[in-house]
Image: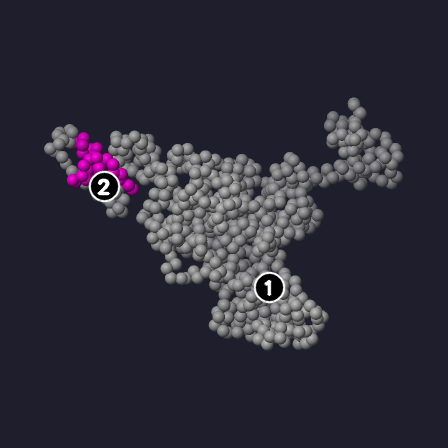
Amino acid sequence: MPTTGSAGLAPRSPGKDLYPCRAAELRGSSCPRPHEHLVSGFSFEQSWPHCSTMVFPLARGARGLLLTFALCMSLACTSRASALVHHDYCIIGAGPSGLQMAYFLQQASRNYVVFERSHAPGSFFALYPRHRKLISINKRYTGKSNSEFNLRHDWNSLLSHDSRLLFRHYSRDFFPHADTMVRYLEDFASRLELQVQYNTAITHVTLDRDQQAWNGHYFILTDQNSQTYRCSLLLVATGTWVPNVVSFTGSEYVEGYETVSINPEDFAGQTVLILGRGNSAFETAENILGVTNFIHMVSRSRVRLSWATHYVGDLRAINNGLLDTYQLKSLDGLLEGDLEDLAIVKDKKGKLHITLRFYLENSNSSAGAETVTLPQDELDNFATRAPYDRVIRCLGWKFDFSIYNRSLRLMPGRGNKRKYPQIKPSYESRGTRGLFVLGTASHSNDFRKSAGGFIHGFRYTTRAVHRLLENRHHGVPWPSPTYPITQLTNSIIKRVNEASGLYQMFSVLADIVLLKENATAFEYLEEYPVGILAQLELHTGRKAPSGLFAVIMEYGRNFSGADKDVFYYNRAVGEAQHAWQSNFLHPVIYYYKRLPTERKMRLRPPDWPLPRPDAIHHIVEDFLTDWTAPNAHILPLRRFLENCLGTDLRNFFAESCFLFALTRQKLPPSCQQGYLRMQGLVGSEGLRRHAVEASLMENYTVVDSPNKLLGGQKELHDQLLKDHVIPGRPLQHLINTKDEL
């Protein structure tokens, strides 16, 4: 039995090298030429140049020859492996998510490359949408100069430090032209000098097990020219670009969205059936609505309006003209049915007739419409009894699984998520460690819930993935500045009023506030994926020993849905005490005394982004999405935080802190962290007047007491208690009163 590492060869004799040339190389001496006479007419230099320095002990016969071949083949493999182009990070696809990740990797000075099959980035947008109008809004004016806030309403820009690379500089249109997106992505890649390798189509991806690799294996990528690349970590940013096709009898007569004519005149006077119910289907219908006889649209599910579901991937108003003509009885119509139960037969005139599959089960499927039993033969008011001139398939796209070897175990999702690969809430593949899915293809994590399938959503999830990778492979913890506890209310209010990541990726990304011991300070982590909250310490390098808050944005529990009336009377809540009934997007703060476990994450209530907390607070919805009202927004939040922490988060003037120091055993945190460190806010007449007018403190007045205090005692009294004595009220009441800012 061969020993470990011998590859089945006999053990080497002591003091005798099996490979004398290799030993000579190690000693730095020369090596004799190979014995080419072993095979007549055969040259090792020509066939395996790397074997030309190898000499075996004189081995005659077949066994020695086979051994020679085996060793040279082994060395050939080793040589090829050493010739592999290696990168720490490989990104497949130079679309928006691929370029976004490339930007973050470049900013961190990592070794990466982006493979793009086309000659330019964003090749998907060079063709789609077919009618060239994007449905991602480009709101150039918001009335505010805060760049972070403005990103809430900019759905096309990628994140970068260069303000010139904001989409508002590229288009004035509210719904931009798709060609503008292509130009924008080209500028983003070139101006930031991202490492993109164009005209490189990755055709095969497999694994190479190696315990020295980051994740226990390398990813081996092969392109169309058989060039191979080795990657420590693989980032898939190819999107979903393979058209969804339904196979049924007669499907060969169906035209695809990807190839159908976009010239309306080609449809003049025709009757058209569209298969599908999404934006591509309605986009196609909108283009030909004014020239066709009528348009019918069939799909297995009812129409889902984005304003009702609050999901931007559902039908947008810009494309829903056919709903008007349907409901206002102008011949067009919508039908529901399983497409796999349909069948299409063609008559001698070229007209297409819709029938059902079971009508053809006992008939010749190749027969024409004249000899096949049609539904209208038995039901004379069958909805689709009129023949069609054209049938168009608009069923969206799915992920391309074909290039991934089975060893990667990259599997499709289930149900309505089967068009996406299965991934964890961390965006890592469930089957292979070190394989992350970015962009539209990662939308299974928040499908029909948030904006993770679109630029204004996945630009933030991509940044989150980068932060996870920085901590895992480079020991760079998740960014988390530390603040004194007195800044907690201000920090939360600031973020909920301007943060674009929380706003766009509602219910998916959350700000995490990690409390320090004794709640004297806190760390603030921005836009962390809530699905992996239980592994926060592992993924961020931060500890949560004293509890935490999670700040997240949510819609009302029962407000969104395809069957919901979102315009009903009294749909909005305005009273702070009813904040928990808010319907529109609003901030929600969860408080946990300890980090939730994975079991609690699994058992969380349906449609809850997080497990049941120890305490929860809703900030009441606001018509202007401006949560800065002192009484409706800030005061209830501050009191909630104080109840959770058991401390006073108000800020006090230095004079008040002085009085508290004389009369109390424990001072409020603002006095501990300010006044006692010779810091803090010294009162002035202007500040007091502002505080009184804003109802933040009582109107204290000065009262002289000459009958009680004489000479220098009176002056000392005025110096210490100026503006603190209320007429007709005892001093003890003053001492127990706090001046609130």
Q: Is residue 375 left or right of residue 656?
A: right
Could you say where residue 458 lies in the image, as x and y percent from the top left? 52, 50
* Label 2 residue SS: helix
Q: In x, y percent, where is residue 513?
A: 43, 40
**Residue at position x 62%, y 75% in the image:** 378
Q: Residues within 10 Å of mark 2 (few under 14, many from 20)?
A: few
Q: In this picture, which residue range is highlighted in magenta?
A: 715-741
> Which residue is tagged 2?
685
Q: Earlier in the sequence, mark 1 or mark 2?
A: 1
On screen, 314 above or below 733?
A: below
The magenta stretch spans residue 737: yes
Q: Front-most of 653 and 424?
A: 424
> In what quadrant of the picture does the C terminus appear?
top left
Pick whichever, 690 or 321, lies toward us: 321
Front position among marks 1 and 2: 1
Residue 155 seen by the camera: yes
Residue 473 belongs to the span the image colors magenta: no
Between the residue at mark 1 and the residue at mark 2, the CA separation in whole angstroms equals 75 Å
Q: Amino acid at mark 2?
A: Glu
Tell me the residue that label 1 is attached to. Answer: 338
Q: Residue at x 44, y 51 (%)?
A: 554
Question: Is mark 1 in CB contact (under 8 Å) with mark 2?
Answer: no
Residue in the image at 18% along x and 32% along y: 717
Residue 189 seen anywhere in this rendered image of the structure: no
Image label count: 2
Amino acid under label 1? Asp
